[in-house]
Image (cartoon, coloured by chain):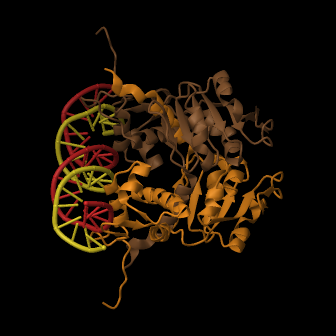
Chain colours: A orange, B brown, C red, D yellow
DNA sequence: ATGTGTGAATCGCTTCACAGCT
DNA sequence: AGCTGTGAAGCGATTCACACAT
């Protein structure tokens, strides 16, 4: 069979896309499997994974099947092996070099967020333009001057930028970030960023989540009457 | 017509649910319309709303149609009116009393997050169990002792709790929060909370977003080769 | 007996396309 | 002419159900 270039997803024939919802669940499975491995659990079934997170077992199996066959019929999945596989799928088998832009309260919090470090996201840089913040310590990092963004990004070999500046400054900062050898951006500013097509961008919006919450609070017991 | 009890969504007959994706977009439309009103723009079409956010005009119209008919054929939507309507739909026509639990870096950042205040989320309370943090100032608030959670929640008439404590403490804190007259919970701890069915809970997970980002970085140019 | 992997069926969201209002 | 509001069509995600492996 010579060349065994297994494409990650060979389920359907011509270029079948994995749903984003599947990727999000993969990340949730990963977190769960992590804790199971830490607890010394060796084996787990799709049904157990599902019920622990509120999904069906079929959902779990279908999600995993996009990437391969990691279980054994009649037995379930080996936690250690599954953890390793999901890490590879999500890109967590690798240390990512991350810069946080903006040393306000959100930026500082993100720079010290332990979940990031635990999953291979190494925060190597935090930048701001406020002379009052430059030079301050944030965890083990010193806030650097954003004027030196390009040089600092190159020196630290940054892969990912987290934008944590006010909305009005976000596009300006982004325009400079995209000239570096960055691969992706996670944007916490509540605005639509324009980026070149070779980059990946994800939007995080905490106020949006709160608004979805209030919608559901308002519309909770709508099914109980009328 | 006498009793004009218009159910919000009367589009389909028996109890048609609004997709969560629609709610999320409503929140995005709201943010956009807000800036337009601030700029003095009076009228806008579904096509303009759509292209500014990367949706189709049909998507925008369909989303709005779940809740009523807010536009005028041939003209579009009045921004001021649309803003008012969406605010009412999402529950933003109302001041929500919010408590942040956990005065670590994430909790402190959330307590001061200007987007919350701008959208009617009034942070009235920040709590922690660490004697080193109790009594400290976070913005205009003083960190209170979590031992007094029930009393402080009652005094401040808290509607919504934001959980920003480490995962291991999240369920314990939640078990106390759910005994108050709270309506909803926004959970930043990376864990599955168990809550009584009368409450609404939303999960926020920043590490998950970063993992989805790295997945897409890895799988970006998958379609260009093979 | 148990639990995976997966085509087929189902469900629900998005897009189309056009009638109807301004 | 221009743009909304909305059934119907299209399409993508979830669930079903069962062959197959242990």
Please count the marks in the image.
Answer: 0
Residue A14 lies in quadrant: bottom left
Could you tell whether B75 is left or right of A176 in the image?
A: left
Residue furthest top as drawn: B2
**Where does the image place residue D15, in percent across and percent down from the top left?**
27, 50
**Where does the image place residue A140, in percent across and percent down from the top left?**
77, 62
The residue drawn where x is 64% and y is 45% is B165
**Where does the image place residue B84, in percent across and percent down from the top left?**
49, 26
Could you tell whether A63 is left or right of B121 in the image?
A: left
Quick check: can you spot residue B13? Answer: yes
Quadrant of image for the N terminus of chain A: bottom left
Residue B136 lies in quadrant: top right
- A120 vs B177, nearest the viewer: B177
- A27 vs B130, nearest the viewer: B130
The residue drawn where x is 34% and y is 16% is B5
- B157 vs B85, nearest the viewer: B157
The residue drawn where x is 69% and y is 51% is A109
Quadrant of image for the C terminus of chain A: top left
- A7 vs A50, nearest the viewer: A50
The residue drawn where x is 48% and y is 61% is A33
Quick check: can you spot residue A195? Answer: no
In the picture shown, does residue A152 fall above or below B28?
below
**Where does the image place residue B205, in percent across and percent down from the top left?**
55, 51
């Amino acid at each position: 069979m010579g060349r065994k270039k297994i494409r990650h997803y060979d389920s359907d024939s011509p270029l079948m896309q994995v749903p984003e919802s599947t990727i999000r669940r993969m990340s949730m499975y990963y977190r769960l499997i992590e804790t199971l491995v830490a607890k010394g659990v060796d084996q787990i079934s799709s049904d157990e994974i599902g019920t622990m997170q509120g999904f069906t077992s079929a959902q779990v199996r279908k999600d995993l099947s996009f990437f391969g066959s990691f279980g054994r019929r009649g037995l379930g999945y080996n936690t250690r092996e599954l953890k390793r596989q999901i890490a590879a799928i999500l890109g967590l088998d690798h240390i990512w070099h991350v810069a946080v832009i903006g040393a306000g309260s959100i930026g500082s919090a993100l720079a010290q967020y332990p979940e990031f470090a635990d999953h291979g996201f190494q925060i190597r840089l935090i930048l701001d333009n406020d002379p009052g913040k430059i030079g301050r310590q944030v965890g083990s990092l010193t806030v650097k001057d954003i004027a030196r963004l390009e040089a600092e990004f190159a020196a630290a070999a940054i892969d990912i930028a987290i934008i944590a500046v006010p909305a009005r400054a976000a596009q300006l900062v982004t325009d400079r970030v995209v000239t570096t050898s960055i691969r992706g951006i996670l944007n916490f500013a509540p605005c639509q960023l324009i980026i070149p097509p070779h980059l990946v961008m994800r939007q995080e919006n905490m106020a949006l989540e709160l608004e979805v919450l209030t919608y559901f609070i308002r519309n909770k017991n709508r099914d109980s009457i009328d």
